[in-house]
C-alpha cells in the first residue's frame, strides 16, 4: 500500500508539472501559460518580479514594450522581438509564449526563432526538452499557441524571435527569463494589438512607442559639476552657425516613421507628419553609437530656455527644463508635467535610440507648430551619464506633409556669445583692476610726480576706467537681451555689478563737483600750491579718497563673482584668467605704490634732517656774530 501510495503521489506530481513552466537544460519543460515554475533545488516557484524590475528589457523593433497597455503592431509585417540584459548582465533559460486571450485567434504561427538566432532559441508549436536527465522529452503547446525557448543553459545576453500576424487581433505575449544564478527568474505579460496600418499621414506609428521601463521620478536629479548639457567647449567667434543641408527630407529607413532628417553622419531624427488636427508628435532620435540622447524644443536654437526630452540608460526618459548651462539648470520636470507617451531609450549593437510621442501644446512649454516652422535642438553624449555632450546642434523644420519636399537646415548650436561674455569680463577687469587703480596710485604718489602730472594721470585713467566699465555694462545688457533664458540683473553678480557702477558714477560726480582749492595770493607763488584748505575741502578729500579705496576692493570682488557666474553658465573656468590678471594687477600696483610712497617719505625725512642742521649752524653763527659786535 505504501508503494502504491508513493506511486500515486509521483503520478500526481507529474500531472501537476504540466501546469508549470519548467526551466530545463535544453528548452522549457512546458508551454503552459502563467508565471509559475515547479520549485526545485535550482529555483523557486514564484518570480522575483516583472521583467521591468530587472536589468532586462523587452523590445519589438527596438521599442520597449509596455506591460500596462496594448502595444500596437502592424499586421502582415515581420517584427523582431528582442529580450536583452543591460549593464553586462546575462541570463540562461527563457520561454516566450504567444496565445489568444480567448482562443478565438490561431496564434500557432505567430512567433518563431529568427534565422540568425537558431543556436540560441528553438520552438514554434513543439520542441524536445531535457528534463531531469531525460533527453528528447517532447513538449507541445496547446492548440493555437506558439512559443520559443532556449537551446541550452549557457549564459546569454540577448535572444530574438520573429512575430507576424495577417489579421487584426489582440494576443497575449508571456515571457519568462531565468537569470544566470539558475534560481531567480522574472515574468511579464504583454498585450500585442495587431492592426492594419493607417495611411493617414497624421496617424500613430505602426508600432506605437511604449513607456520606458525606468520612468522618471519627481525627485531632482543629482548631477555633478560636469553633468550638464552645454554648448560646444570650443565655440567659434562667428555667430552665423555652419549649415548642413539634409538630402533626406522625406525619406525614412525606419518603417515606423514617415520622414527622417540626417543631423550628422551619426545621428538621425525620425518623425511622422503632423497637420492642423494633430495633437502629438511621434518621433525618434537614433545614434549609431552608445550614449545618452536629448531632443528639445527651442525658440532660437539655444539650449537655455528650452524644454528637452532626455534619455539615458541610467535614468530612463524624462522631460527637463533647461534654465542655464550648469548642472543646476538641467531640471527634471515634476511628475504632473511628465506627459510623454511611449517614451523609451534603447541601446544595443545597432546604437542608441530615443523614442517618444510628445504633446504639441503643453502649459509653460514652447509649443510645436504642426503646420509651421519649428526650431528643435538635439545632443548626444559619449556615455550614459549626463555630462558635456559630444555632439549637439539645432535644426528648423516644418513637420507637415506639404513641407516634406523642403530642405531642412541643420545648424550647429551657437556659442551663445560665450566669447563675448569673456570679453565682458576682460573689460571689467581692465577697468577695475588696472585703469582705476592706476588713477588711485597717481593720487597717492602726487609727491613723487612733478608738478600736476599726478592729477592729469589720475583724471585720465579714471576716464579710461569709466569708459571700459560702461562698455562692459552695455555688452552685458545686449547679451542678456539677445540670449534666450537670461534675465536682466537676476543674480548676485549682476546686482553687485550695478551697485558698483552706480557708486562709480557718484564718485565721478564728486570729483567733478569737488570744492576748489585756494591759491597763494602773493606774486612769488606761481606753482599753484595749496595754502590752508577749507574745512569743506578737507572733509571732501577724506571721503573721496576712502570711498575710492573701498570701491576698488568691492569691484575686485564683483570681478571674482563674475568668474563664478560664467562657470554657472558654461561649466568652464575660462574666466579664471580674467580674475588672475585682475588680482595680479592690483597686487603689483598696490605694492609698487606703497614702495614709492615709503621711498618718498624716506627722502623727505632725510631732507628735513638736513634742514634742521642748517638752522642750528645758522643760529650758532648768529650768536657768535653778536658776541663779536658786543666786544667791539
Image (cartoon, helix red, strand yellow):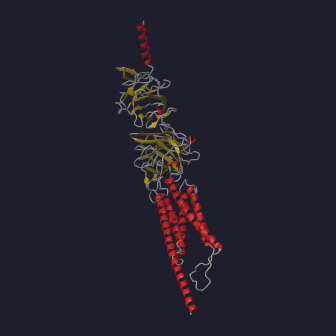
Quarter of the picture containing the N terminus is top left
The residue under the point 62% across, 83% down is 521
Q: Give the total number of marks visible in the rendering.
A: 0
Q: Nearer the viewer, residue 406 or 465?
A: 465
When asked about the image quadrant of residue 622, the answer is: bottom right
Q: Nearer the viewer, residue 403 or 2?
A: 2
Q: Nearer the viewer, residue 42 or 550?
A: 550
Residue 421 lies left or right of residue 264; in this view the side is right
When asked about the image quadrant of residue 149, the answer is: top left
Farthest right residue?
Answer: 535
Quarter of the picture containing the C terminus is bottom right
Q: Position of residue 273 (x, y in %)?
A: 50, 44
Farthest front residue?
Answer: 631
Q: Nearer the viewer, residue 558 or 349?
A: 558
Q: Is residue 76 above or below residue 261?
A: above
Q: Position of residue 471 (x, y in %)?
A: 53, 65
Q: Position of residue 77 (x, y in %)?
A: 43, 34
Q: Is residue 554 above or below residue 113?
A: below
Amino acid at each position: 500500500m505504501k508503494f502504491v501510495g508513493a506511486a500515486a503521489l509521483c503520478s500526481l506530481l507529474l500531472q501537476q508539472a504540466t501546469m508549470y513552466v519548467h526551466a530545463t537544460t535544453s528548452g522549457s519543460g512546458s508551454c503552459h501559460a502563467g508565471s509559475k515554475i515547479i520549485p526545485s533545488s535550482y529555483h523557486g516557484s514564484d518570480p522575483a518580479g516583472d521583467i521591468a524590475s530587472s536589468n532586462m528589457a523587452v523590445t519589438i523593433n527596438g521599442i520597449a514594450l509596455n506591460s500596462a497597455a496594448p502595444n500596437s503592431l502592424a499586421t502582415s509585417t515581420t517584427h523582431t522581438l528582442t529580450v536583452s540584459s543591460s549593464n553586462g548582465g546575462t541570463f540562461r533559460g527563457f520561454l516566450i509564449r504567444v496565445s489568444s486571450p480567448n482562443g478565438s485567434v490561431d496564434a500557432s504561427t505567430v512567433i518563431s526563432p529568427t534565422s540568425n538566432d537558431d543556436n540560441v532559441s528553438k520552438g514554434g508549436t513543439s520542441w524536445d526538452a531535457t528534463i531531469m536527465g531525460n533527453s528528447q522529452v517532447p513538449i507541445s503547446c496547446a492548440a493555437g499557441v506558439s512559443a520559443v525557448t532556449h537551446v541550452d543553459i549557457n549564459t546569454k545576453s540577448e535572444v530574438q524571435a520573429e512575430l507576424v500576424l495577417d489579421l487584426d487581433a489582440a494576443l497575449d505575449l508571456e515571457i519568462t527569463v531565468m537569470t544566470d544564478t539558475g534560481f531567480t527568474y522574472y515574468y511579464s505579460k504583454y498585450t500585442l494589438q495587431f492592426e492594419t496600418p493607417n495611411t493617414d499621414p497624421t496617424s500613430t506609428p505602426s508600432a506605437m512607442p511604449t513607456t520606458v521601463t525606468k520612468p522618471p521620478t519627481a525627485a531632482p536629479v543629482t548631477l555633478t559639476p560636469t553633468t550638464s548639457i552645454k554648448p560646444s567647449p570650443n565655440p567659434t567667434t562667428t555667430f552665423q552657425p555652419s549649415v548642413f543641408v539634409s538630402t533626406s527630407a522625406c525619406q525614412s529607413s525606419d518603417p515606423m516613421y514617415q520622414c527622417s532628417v540626417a543631423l550628422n553622419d551619426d545621428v538621425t531624427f525620425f518623425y511622422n507628419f503632423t497637420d492642423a488636427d494633430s495633437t502629438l508628435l511621434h518621433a525618434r532620435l537614433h545614434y549609431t553609437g552608445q550614449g545618452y540622447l536629448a531632443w528639445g524644443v527651442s525658440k532660437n536654437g539655444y539650449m537655455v530656455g528650452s524644454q528637452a526630452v532626455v534619455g539615458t540608460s541610467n535614468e530612463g526618459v524624462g522631460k527637463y527644463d533647461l534654465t542655464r548651462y550648469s548642472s543646476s539648470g538641467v531640471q527634471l520636470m515634476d511628475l504632473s508635467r511628465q506627459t510623454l507617451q511611449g517614451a523609451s531609450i534603447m541601446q544595443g549593437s545597432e546604437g542608441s535610440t530615443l523614442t517618444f510621442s510628445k504633446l504639441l501644446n503643453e502649459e509653460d512649454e514652447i509649443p510645436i507648430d504642426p503646420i509651421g516652422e519649428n526650431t528643435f535642438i538635439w545632443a548626444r553624449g559619449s556615455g550614459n551619464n549626463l555630462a558635456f555632450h559630444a555632439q549637439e546642434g539645432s535644426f528648423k523644420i516644418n513637420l507637415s506633409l506639404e513641407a516634406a519636399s523642403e530642405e531642412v537646415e541643420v545648424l550647429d548650436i551657437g556659442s551663445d556669445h560665450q566669447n563675448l561674455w569673456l570679453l565682458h569680463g576682460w573689460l571689467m577687469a581692465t577697468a577695475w583692476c588696472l585703469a582705476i587703480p592706476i588713477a588711485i596710485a597717481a593720487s597717492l604718489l602726487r609727491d613723487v610726480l612733478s608738478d600736476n602730472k599726478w592729477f592729469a594721470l589720475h583724471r585720465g585713467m579714471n576716464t579710461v576706467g569709466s569708459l571700459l566699465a560702461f562698455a562692459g555694462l552695455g555688452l552685458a545688457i545686449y547679451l542678456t537681451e539677445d540670449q534666450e533664458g537670461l534675465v536682466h540683473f537676476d543674480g548676485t553678480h549682476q546686482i553687485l555689478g550695478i551697485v558698483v557702477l552706480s557708486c562709480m558714477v557718484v564718485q565721478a560726480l564728486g570729483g567733478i563737483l569737488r570744492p576748489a582749492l585756494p591759491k597763494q595770493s602773493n606774486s612769488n607763488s606761481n606753482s599753484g600750491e595749496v595754502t590752508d584748505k577749507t574745512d569743506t575741502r578737507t572733509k571732501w578729500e577724506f571721503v573721496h579718497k576712502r570711498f575710492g579705496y573701498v570701491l576698488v576692493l568691492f569691484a575686485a570682488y564683483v570681478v571674482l563673482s563674475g568668474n563664478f557666474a560664467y562657470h554657472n553658465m558654461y561649466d568652464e573656468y575660462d574666466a579664471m584668467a580674467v580674475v588672475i590678471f585682475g588680482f595680479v594687477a592690483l597686487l603689483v600696483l598696490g605694492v609698487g605704490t606703497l614702495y614709492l610712497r615709503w621711498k618718498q617719505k624716506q627722502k623727505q625725512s632725510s631732507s628735513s634732517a638736513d634742514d634742521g642742521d642748517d638752522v642750528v649752524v645758522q643760529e650758532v653763527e648768529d650768536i657768535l656774530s653778536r658776541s663779536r659786535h658786543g666786544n667791539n
